[in-house]
Amino acid sequence: MNEKAPVQTEHADPQTILARMGDGFLAVDDSWSITYANAEGQEILRASMSDDIDTIDGRHLWDSIPESRDTVFYDRLTEAMTTQEAVTFEAHYSRVDKWFEVRAFPSDSGLSVYFRDISEYKSLAQERQDSLYALQQLYSISSDGAKEFPDKATEMLALGCEYLDIPNGFITRIEQGEQRVVHSVATHPEVQEGQFVPAG
């Protein structure tokens, strides 16, 4: 009877797995000295630190980034270390101008921290919120029965310029081969009310 050879299964060690992660990871001991950071974690830490360094390991987290003591990061990570309870939060870090989703898991020997860059998600969410606000304002202006159309047009053009961050907003009418500006909140002299050009 032939016996099959046992299947050899390779398991990557935890540090190898963390090193392959796209998200940032760092570990600190109970005195806040950095004991490990993967490549993404090191990149974020170096961008946050006030001095150029060759190695991250062994650096005191808060002493290396002193301005972080006045942030949500310091408050929530200190909370996790003190209470020995995991925390999850989102916060913006101005030094690198990014939003992070942070998950921190404490133990008797320190803290493991995972942080994911969610700046793009936050930007899209803000754009959706701004768009919804603009639509609500447009509806409010257009449905106001107490205002005449010229006033509504001026307010809507101003709102459009603010939302799109452009200097010129105007409405034209084409009559008898001419395109004439009939309403304008523009700064450009050629698109003021009453200006016209051939429709062609």
Image (spheres, rainbow, N blue to C red):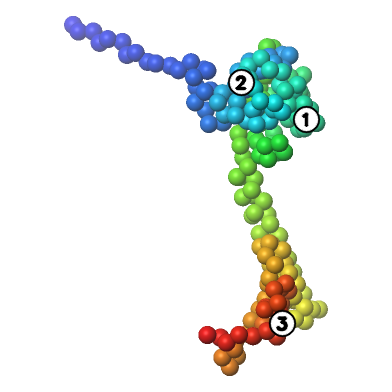
Point 43% across, 16% down: residue? 11
Q: Residue furthest top?
A: 1
Q: Residues within 10 Å of mark 1 (few under 14, many from 20)?
A: some
Q: Is residue 53 above or below residue 119?
A: above
Q: Which label's residue is closer to the chain start, 2 or 3?
A: 2
Residue that numbered label 3 is attached to? 193
Q: Quadrant of residue 120?
A: top right
Give the camera-side residue of 8 and 30.
30
Element type at marker 1? helix
Q: Is residue 6 above or below residue 196?
A: above
Number of the label disc, if any, that sits on residue 54 = 2
Q: What kind of residue is marked 3?
A: Glu
Q: Quadrant of the N terminus?
A: top left
| Residue under the image location 66 percent in, 62 percent down | 164
Q: Nearer the viewer, mark 2 or mark 3?
A: 2
Outermost residue to the bottom:
176
In the image, 143: left or right of 45?
A: right
Earlier residue among tags 1 and 2: 2
Determine whether label 3 and label 1 are within 8 Å by CB: no
In this rendering, is residue 56 above or below 103? above
Which of 85/75 is in front?
75
How packed mark 2 is, by other alpha carbons closer than 10 Å (few <14, some 14-19, many 20 or more), is few
Mark 2 belongs to which amino acid? Asp
Specify the label residue 67 is tagged with.
1
Picture mark count: 3
In the rendered image, is residue 99 in sight? no
Q: Nearer the viewer, mark 1 or mark 2?
A: 2
Q: Secondary structure at mark 3?
A: loop
Going by the numbered disc 1, the residue's amino acid type is: Glu
